[in-house]
Amino acid sequence: MEFAQYASPDVRQTKSASSPVHRGHGEIAARRLQIYVFDPELGRRRRYRITLEIPYEKLDSLGENMSRPSGRLINIVDYDAAADVHYPLANLDHPAVLASGGLDPQVDSHEFHQQMVYAVTMKVVANFERALGRRLDFDRLTVLPHAFQGRNAFFHPTTSSLNFGYFRADPDNPGGNLPGQWVFTCLSHDIVAHEMTHAIVHRLRPHFFEATNPDVFAFHEGIADIVAIFQHFGFPGVLSEAVQKGRADLSRPGPLLDLAKQFGYSTGNGAALRTATEANGPDPKLYRATFAPHDRGSVLVRAVFDAFFTTYATRVEDLIRIATGGTGVLGEGYLPPDLVNRVTQEAGDTAQRVLDLCIRAFDYLPPIDVTFSDYLRALVTADKELNPEDPFDLRANLVDAFLARGIHPEGVFSPNEESLLWDAPEASIIEANLDPNVLDALTAYEAQRWGAKTSRTARKEVDWVAQNLHAWASTHHAALQLESNDRIPIEVKGFHSMFRVGSDGQLLTEAGVQFVQTPPNPSTGLGGLQPRAGTTVVFSGDGSARYVIPKPLQVLADNSPSQEDPRVKSLMRFVRECDERDPLFPWAGEAYDLSNRMARRFNFALVHHGIRPVSPNPAEATNGG
């Protein structure tokens, strides 16, 4: 690779930030690391280089005051396959680095590349753990900042790795880069946050990696963009600048709402990779007409941000009235600093609430075959649980934004909130509550995971919890719209505690569980995909089933999915449409591995390969294959 190799940091890098944040009693609360807010192209301006606070954790030790940038969930391996070289790893525990808030941003330092990836991935983790109210628990991800040479970056589920490419900028139209300069995807906050979100979503709902309808991969892409862009709002200097330039209107185009600007421009496309803005407003026909995952996912992104803009505007309208003597019309010139500060605070708080909601909604999603309709209902239910009053009408704004883009909730009487909430099961069909001891054991395990390590005894308790959940589901399979366990095994796919504060201010403990059934005899003509049944159950603290969120499946006597099942019919239509759009399909034959062709078409490396900017003007959107 043609960029300078730097040795371990020395004492000269001590000038820009303070030491780690302490809670008291000597405990370190946060680690401070410098990053580019967006990417190196915008990072030429000092205000777009910030010190990011992430939760402190002990890194892998290499001796006294020596470590490598790997911790509980992230293992950075800086192997460059194109150059066949392992780059030395950054020592983020060096006293000079700790004192200065990390390494200074440097485009040509592989050690800073490692710091950037570690800081941004852990910020995504912090946002998910904040919203979910529990600690993420999965085997460490291998992160390769220089995995390959190419215009791509992707999460690979099989190898459990994040792979970031690097490439030369377009020689004729490089945007704000030098012609032919190296561009590193690992230095784009948005690309790193996007890929890390893919990895976490896969841990939360592994079957969302199966493209069983057009929304599944679009949802993956949409939620990854939502997390990446909303993280911009957590950078106060960037947000206050947008408030001042937009005169309190945050929906105006600009870097705050753009995703991966350097990547888009350096490839010669002349635009950011994607954006949360719309040039001509929502198009109610676009969702049904859009097929490619990134384009379809952008419809979801814009619906969520439309709801955010409306909610934010409601929250700041009183501030605008006060500042304008009741007219609500801002005068010419710069906004007063006090107004900018207050509006920035409201914008940041609103963005954090919406981001938290977008993540917490995962607790109310089915375990399989997700649709945008499912997500809207999950958003409404999750917000109703946490914020029953909803003084700024966020839930109504979400519904209006989805409807305006042609995303119509399915299986409900109306788009009103009371119809969109997931249903509670009738008491008559649930014969007995889950044993409260099961929930107590699960809660105790969750509490232990916030410590350094979980004990072997605690893990045995978790096995006991899984056995009891399986027994409960076997007894109540009909209420869960699943087949008998004697006929098709019921898998306990995941379970966790859920914590929320009730309207009386008391802490309420619940539990979320995902059950999945896979018929042993798959259907033909589905491109290798296996239809499944699945149900998410949310239990109250007393063991009663609070919500049952099913995806049922009709199964024939031979334990194969019925081709008359609505979900199977929908899947068959989706596979046929994919076949029609695939230029390899008519002639590839057996060499194309037709039995598994859907999995070959839908993987993150392929979906991200050669991606082009999504137009902010819906009228210009095209249907990619």
Image (cartoon, grey):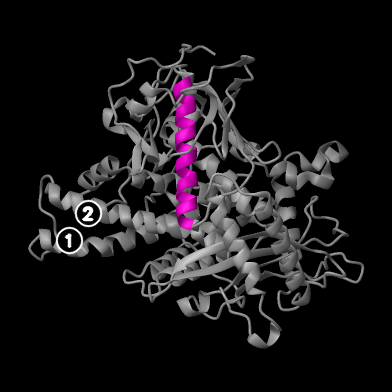
Pointer 2 local density, CA inside 10 Å: few below 14, some 14–19, many at least 20 = many
Q: In the rendered image, which quarter contains the C terminus?
A: top right
Q: Are marks 1 and 2 in contact (CB under 8 Å)?
A: yes
N-terminal-most mark, 1 or 2: 1
What residue is shown with label 1?
A: 319
Pointer 1 local density, CA inside 10 Å: few below 14, some 14–19, many at least 20 = some
Magenta part of the chain: 111-131
Question: Is residue 269 in view from this perspective?
Answer: no
Q: Residue furthest front?
A: 25
Q: Which residue type carries mark 2?
A: Val
**Measured from the top left, where is residue 48 in percent x and y?**
31, 32
Q: Which residue type carries mark 1?
A: Leu
**Measured from the top left, where is residue 116 in percent x and y?**
45, 30
In the image, residue 114 lies in the stretch drawn in magenta = yes
| Observer-nearest of 354 and 509 | 509
Query: At 71% from the left edge and 67% from the top edge, which residue is drawn?
Result: 469
What residue is shown with label 2?
A: 343
Q: Is residue 325 above or below residue 237?
A: below
Q: Is residue 268 above or below residue 496?
A: above
Kindly indicate the quadrant of the structure image that contains residue 489: bottom right
Query: At 73% from the left edge and 68% from the top edge, which residue is drawn?
Result: 468
- Left or right placement of residue 190 versus residue 87 in this view: left
**Measured from the top left, where is residue 283 in percent x and y?**
45, 59
| Observer-nearest of 111 and 302 | 111
Main secondary structure found in the magenta portion: helix
Kindly indicate the quadrant of the structure image that contains residue 93: top left
Cα distance, mark 1 to mark 2? 7 Å
Q: Residue furthest right?
A: 558
